[in-house]
Amino acid sequence: MSSEKIKEVKAASEDAVETARDEIEAVKAHLERLITKHIVPALTNAGSKAENLTDQAVANAKELANHARQDISKQTRGPSSLVSIAISGVVGFILGRLSR
């Protein structure tokens, strides 16, 4: 190979390297614009939706807990009041019988 051919090959390879660098920089800039314009707002939107859903889930859980507490309270109060009435009736009956 002659020295001129070597210089031509070297110049061609340097041009190819420079072209590849320029293309990589263009792709990098395009990717940064894509992320900035589309991905970041979408993630922000998804985060706010997730926060809203979390708040709703917490509110629903609190409401369910309150309903369960009220249901349990009603169930425990019902029989005890009936038992109190029954005991009062039996005690009244016995006292009535003893007072005669």
Image (cartoon, rainbow, N blue to C red):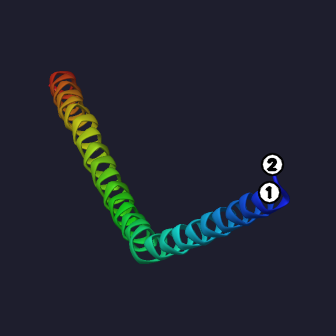
| Residue 50 pos. (x, y %) | 38, 60
Label 2 residue SS: loop
Residue 76, how many percent across, how many down?
A: 28, 35
Residue at 56% x, 68% y is 23
Residue at the farthest right position? 3
- Front residue of 3/23: it is 3
Residue 75, above or below 43: above
**Secondary structure beneath disc 1?**
helix
* Three-letter code for the amino acid on which mark 1 is drawn: Ile
- Circle 2 packing at 10 Å, graded few (<14), some (14-19), many (20+), is few
**Residue that appears at 39% across and 72% down:** 38
CB atoms at circles 1 and 2 under 8 Å apart? yes
User: As drawn, is 67 to the left or to the right of 48?
Assistant: left
Tell me the kind of residue under disc 2: Met
Q: Where is mark 2, residue-wise?
A: 1
Quadrant hosting residue 37: bottom left
- Residue 54, given in percent of the width and then of the height, sits at 38, 58
Q: Which residue has dot 1 on it?
A: 6
Q: Nearer the viewer, residue 85 or 13?
A: 13
